């Protein structure tokens, strides 16, 4: 009987999801015994792994559910919800809305269809300051609005979203009763993990063109990054063909590469989480142009 719906390679993603859950459970169990430096190290690893899972394992699962069995997909989503501390059903609908808006700029009424658009809280049609986007986006999420949107479209999904939240809440409550000190220690790393997710998300679109479908996303072809993050670097390609399986992203890039270059698809050198290090960021080019202008003006003054 066929278990995996799309590709045998999804077995790796499933295993990574299970191991991530096991990591969080291990973190909780060893908390009373491990030295502080081990706990801090594990907390920081968890923070990075939240972004890795959401942008890799979880992201691919919501686009192309791994299993042929609906109940297995639901159970995997519950496990992911507990591991990441967010309802996967809620995430799925927010992310699908993201693909409908594609990080759009505000309309004449100041509204973006994409709730996580980098332009939503910006000014004058420009992207929001990255620091504000990274550290405030998680706090801006509105579960009630998300639930209303899900319920309007799919009542079954709305119920499953609530089930995921109830299971997550029960897990936290039981864990809090067993060791409340762990959750106090864990909370900053949890928040930092979602900030890392928004850091990644910012540079997945910063410098992209929300008016051109082929250039909606920003890509990074760093080989190690794409190996570890399930081809998340092929983001322009992903927005161009959202339902295409992650294993086929490189092939799509090769097919549309010429059109991408012609339309000015933005490509950065580092992984998206390190996108601020890219030497060709728009704000660096503006700063460089300003510096060159000031130098030319000083030179002209000396010559006069």
Image (cartoon, rainbow, N blue to C red):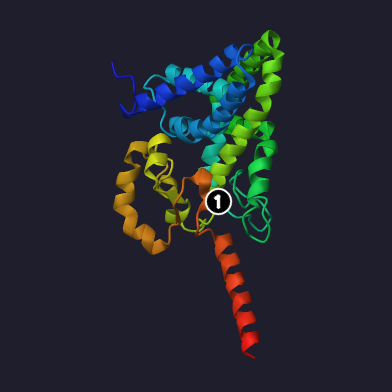
Quarter of the picture containing the N terminus is top left
Whether residue 88 is visible to the viewer of this picture, yes or no, is yes
- Mark 1: give few (<14), some (14-19) or many (20+) Cα within 10 Å: some
| Residue 141 falls left or right of residue 251 | right
| Residue 192 falls left or right of residue 234 | right
In the displayed structure, would residue 55 be above or below residue 178? below
In the displayed structure, would residue 96 be above or below residue 118? above
Residue denoted by label 1 = 276
In the displayed structure, would residue 105 be above or below residue 57? below
Whether residue 86 is visible to the viewer of this picture, yes or no, is no
Pick out the residue farthest to the top: 178
Residue at (65% x, 32% y) in the render: 191
Element class at badge 1: helix
Quarter of the picture containing the C terminus is bottom right
Which one is in front, 285 or 59? 285
Residue at (49% x, 30% y) in the render: 53
Q: Give how far across and how far down residue 62 sits, in percent.
A: 47, 31
**Number of dots carrying numbers:** 1
Q: Give how far across and how far down residue 29 sits, in percent.
A: 58, 11
Q: Give how far across and how far down residue 13 sits, in percent.
A: 40, 27
Which one is in front, 89 or 7? 7
Q: Give how far across and how far down residue 164 sits, in percent.
A: 58, 20
Residue at (65% x, 37% y) in the render: 138
Residue at (29% x, 19% y) in the render: 2
Pick out the residue farthest to the bottom: 304
């Amino acid at each position: 009987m066929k278990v995996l719906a799309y590709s045998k390679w999804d077995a790796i993603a499933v295993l990574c999801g299970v191991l991530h859950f096991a990591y969080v459970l291990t973190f909780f169990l060893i908390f009373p015994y491990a030295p502080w430096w081990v706990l801090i190290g594990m907390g920081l690893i968890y923070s990075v792994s939240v972004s890795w899972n959401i942008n890799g394992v979880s992201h691919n699962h919501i686009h192309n559910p791994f299993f042929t069995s609906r109940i297995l997909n639901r159970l995997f989503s519950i496990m992911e919800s507990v591991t990441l501390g967010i309802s996967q059903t809620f995430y799925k609908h927010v992310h699908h809305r993201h693909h409908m808006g594609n990080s759009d700029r505000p309309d004449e009424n100041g509204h973006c269809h994409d709730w996580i658009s980098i332009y939503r809280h910006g000014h004058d049609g420009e992207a929001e300051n990255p620091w504000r986007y990274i550290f405030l986006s998680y706090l801006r999420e509105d579960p009630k609005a998300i639930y209303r949107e899900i319920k309007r479209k799919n009542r079954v999904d709305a119920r499953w979203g609530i089930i995921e939240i109830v299971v997550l809440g029960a897990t936290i409550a039981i864990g809090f009763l067993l060791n409340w000190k762990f959750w106090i220690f864990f909370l900053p790393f949890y928040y930092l993990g979602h900030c890392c997710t928004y850091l990644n998300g910012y540079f997945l679109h910063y410098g992209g063109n929300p008016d051109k479908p082929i250039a909606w996303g920003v890509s990074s072809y760093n080989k190690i990054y794409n190996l570890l993050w399930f081809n998340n670097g092929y983001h322009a390609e992903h927005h161009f063909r959202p339902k295409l399986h992650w294993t086929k992203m490189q092939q799509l890039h090769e097919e549309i590469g010429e059109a991408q270059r012609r339309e000015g698809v933005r490509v950065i050198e580092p992984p998206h989480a390190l996108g601020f290090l890219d030497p060709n960021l728009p704000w660096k080019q503006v700063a460089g142009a300003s510096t060159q202008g000031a130098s030319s003006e000083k030179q002209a003054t000396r010559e006069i």
